[in-house]
Image: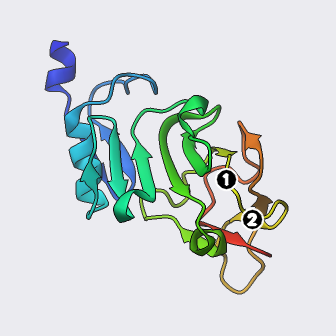
């Protein structure tokens, strides 16, 4: 425990930096400091617990430590690590969010797995990687995938190609 107290951990520009220490396991109990650092990087959220932040009046939520079971029915969820591990961002599937959901800078190029339990039209909602002057690589956002096709490259979720 003393080692953890001495570790200087900060989130900056979407990167987790731990100087001189190995990273905590993905499923370790999150600390208030980790939530506070995330909220500093992605402002305007409401701290729900030491593991959860709420945005946009509860229609977007971030869990700092999650599993596949953390994705609630009726929501779309992206995870920062394969096999539904690490931090998870989830949003409810209102018609507005089925059209387009842009990831915050923290989540851009970090999506490694996903679960879909929402209500957007099947085969018509995609994870996409924004590319200038060329088609955006995409993957259908349906069911669950422990590994995504374009790992750590997606920038947004959107309806249609």
Q: Which of marks 2 and 1 is in front?
A: 1
Percent from the top left, x then y, of residue 36? Answer: 21, 46
Specify the farthest residue to the top: 1
The quarter holding residue 105 reads bottom left
Q: Distance between the residues labelled 2 and 1?
A: 10 Å
**Callout 1: SS:** loop
- Judging depth in this view, the residue of 90 and 151 nearest the camera is 90
Question: Residue drawn 39% across and 54% down?
Answer: 14
Discs 2, 1 touching: Cβ within 8 Å: yes
Question: Residue drawn 20% across and 12% down?
Answer: 1
Percent from the top left, x then y, of residue 31? Answer: 25, 31
From the viewer's perspective, is 157 left or right of 147?
left
Specify the farthest residue to the right: 123
From the viewer's perspective, is 91 left or right of 116?
left
Q: Label 2 crowding class (10 Å Cα cut-off): few <14, some 14-19, many 20+?
A: many
The residue that mark 1 highlights is: 118
Percent from the top left, x then y, of residue 7? Answer: 20, 28
**Callout 2: SS:** strand
Quadrant of the snapshot with the C terminus = bottom right
The residue that mark 2 highlights is: 125
């Amino acid at each position: 425990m003393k080692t953890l107290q001495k570790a200087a951990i900060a989130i900056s520009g979407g990167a987790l930096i731990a100087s001189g220490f190995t990273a905590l396991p993905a499923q370790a109990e999150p600390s208030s400091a980790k939530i506070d650092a995330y909220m500093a990087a992605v402002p305007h959220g409401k701290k729900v617990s030491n593991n959860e932040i709420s945005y946009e009046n509860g229609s977007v939520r971030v869990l700092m430590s999650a599993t596949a079971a953390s994705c609630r029915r009726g929501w779309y969820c992206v995870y920062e690590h394969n096999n539904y591990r690490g931090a998870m961002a989830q949003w409810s599937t209102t018609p507005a969010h089925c059209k387009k959901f842009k990831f915050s800078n923290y989540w851009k190029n970090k999506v490694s797995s996903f679960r879909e339990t929402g209500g957007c039209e099947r085969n018509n909602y995609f994870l996409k990687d924004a590319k200038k002057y060329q088609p955006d690589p995409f993957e259908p956002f349906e069911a669950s995938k422990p590994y995504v096709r374009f790992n750590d490259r997606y920038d947004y979720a959107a309806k249609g190609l």
